[in-house]
Image: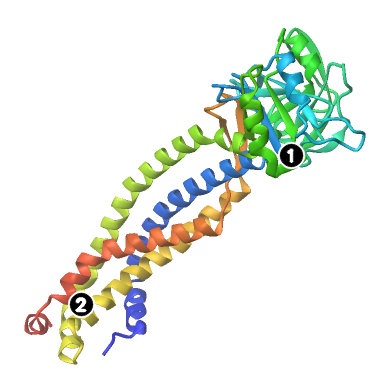
């Protein structure tokens, strides 16, 4: 004879104030847990979409970021002539020799400046990144002191609108266009002519090279050829892999901090759920005795109270998940620990996060309700009825 679900729901409704408060406590923990996962997913998605699968990035061996890398002109020319590199419609090699530096800009409404990536790109720079679309103005003219800025830079930093001038590297640079990079990391960058930026920053070497492979499946062969060339001291990575690696340090920090807070809060929430369930058992001793006298077994009582606790966890999970889903409307800006540059990205809710969050909420309900349910199941019939 099984305890009906209606019995469980009726008891929760009878104690609706206590139920709401307990579910609210669980919802707070679930909100923190889901927000951490969404933040990490948004970060990884932003940096993964920065790269194209068909593209490969060449950096100096031992360099973890573009800022640290350096590629001499002679090495860049050797890589450019590799037959694995694709040609465009005009039979030009799809290669962008790039220089990457950091400058400080003032954020809107903030006193302290933040680091921003300045990327000097070659003529094929835009063609190699089809997700980068010009939204206003025009592309900078080659050989000029003109720049175009990403959407996050325009919205977050002063003096970056079309027609404004930025002074860095002892020169005035005019903003002539803005672009949208499809919520990728390029949205937090400023682009200009690579040769002009190298001269302005007194660089004698490029930072990186980005190339389009004629056959994406030939990546391993291309990498082996570069590694085996004694003239080169370069490392080759797929562009998606390279930018994904840039999220590792920040992702680790977000997860450690967020999960530490989640564990602390979840202990409090489970204790709250446990107290609520113990109070429920205490107020229904006679009722439990009556159920046992009517033929309900100990397992039926145990299941009934566990269902109550799981339902509390489910309600709290849905409430917390609903609140966390609203975070998708907001963007988050922080410093990327790999590049030390400002990076903007959004919270991202995925089916996997929904499943993990609800599973976490049910686990809290299960753990918080197990001991009270066990206590209820162990009550003796005679003692229970005597308490009536």
- The N terminus is located in which quarter? bottom left
Which residue reaches farthest right? 90
Label 1: which residue? 181
Characterize the local packing of mark 2: few (<14), some (14-19) or many (20 or more) Cα atoms within 10 angstroms: some
Is residue 112 shown above or below 263?
above
Is residue 285 shown above or below 144?
below
Q: Can residue 239 be seen in this view?
A: no
Residue 210 is situated, as x and y percent measured from the top left of the image, at: 72, 30
Name which residue lies at 74% across and 35% down. 151
Residue 200: mark = none
From the viewer's perspective, tell me whether residue 278 is left or right of residue 237: left
In terms of sequence position, does the residue under pointer 2 or pointer 1 come before the other?
A: 1
Name which residue lies at 84% across and 35% down. 87
Pick the front one: 49 or 293: 49
Characterize the local packing of mark 1: few (<14), some (14-19) or many (20 or more) Cα atoms within 10 angstroms: many
Name which residue lies at 83% across and 30% down. 93
Label 1 sits on a secondary structure element that is loop
Which residue reaches farthest bottom? 294
Determine the CA span between mark 2 and mark 1. Answer: 61 Å
Label 2: which residue? 284
Q: Can residue 177 be seen in this view?
A: yes
Residue 245 is situated, as x and y percent measured from the top left of the image, at: 55, 35
Pick the front one: 256 or 167: 256
Name which residue lies at 74% across and 37% down. 213
């Amino acid at each position: 004879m099984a305890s009906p679900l209606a019995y469980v729901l009726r008891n929760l409704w009878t104690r609706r104030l206590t139920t709401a408060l307990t579910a609210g406590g669980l919802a707070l923990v679930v909100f923190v847990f889901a927000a951490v996962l969404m933040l990490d997913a948004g970060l990884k998605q932003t940096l993964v979409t920065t790269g194209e699968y068909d593209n490969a990035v060449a950096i100096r061996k031992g360099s973890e970021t573009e800022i640290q890398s350096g590629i001499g002109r002679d090495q860049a020319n050797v890589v450019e002539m590799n037959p694995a590199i694709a040609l465009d419609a005009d039979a030009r090699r799809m290669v962008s020799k790039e220089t990457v530096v950091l400058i400080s800009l003032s954020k809107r409404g903030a006193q302290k400046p933040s680091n921003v990536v300045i990327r000097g790109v070659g003529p094929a720079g835009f063609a190699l990144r089809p997700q980068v679309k010009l939204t206003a103005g025009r592309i900078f003219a080659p050989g000029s002191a003109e720049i175009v800025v990403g959407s996050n830079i325009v919205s977050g930093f002063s003096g970056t609108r079309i027609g404004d001038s930025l002074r860095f590297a002892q020169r005035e640079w005019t903003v002539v266009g803005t672009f949208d990079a499809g919520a990728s990391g390029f949205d937090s960058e400023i682009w200009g002519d690579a040769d002009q930026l190298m001269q302005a920053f007194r660089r004698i070497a490029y930072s990186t090279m980005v190339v389009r492979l004629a056959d994406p499946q030939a990546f391993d062969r291309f990498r082996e050829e570069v590694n085996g060339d004694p003239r080169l001291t370069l490392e080759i990575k797929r562009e998606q892999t390279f930018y994904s690696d840039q999220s590792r340090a920040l992702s680790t920090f977000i997860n450690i901090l967020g999960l530490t807070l989640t564990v602390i809060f979840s202990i409090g929430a489970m204790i709250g759920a446990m107290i609520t369930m113990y109070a429920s058992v205490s107020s229904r001793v006679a009722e439990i005795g009556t159920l046992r006298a009517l033929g309900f077994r100990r397992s039926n009582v145990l299941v009934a109270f566990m269902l109550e606790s799981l339902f509390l966890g489910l309600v709290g999970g849905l409430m917390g998940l609903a609140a966390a889903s609203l975070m998708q409307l907001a963007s988050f800006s922080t410093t990327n620990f790999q590049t030390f540059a400002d990076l903007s990205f959004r919270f991202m809710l995925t089916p996997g996060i929904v499943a993990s969050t609800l599973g976490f909420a049910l686990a809290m309900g299960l753990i918080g309700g197990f001991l009270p349910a066990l206590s209820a199941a162990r009550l003796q019939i005679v003692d229970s009825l005597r308490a009536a």
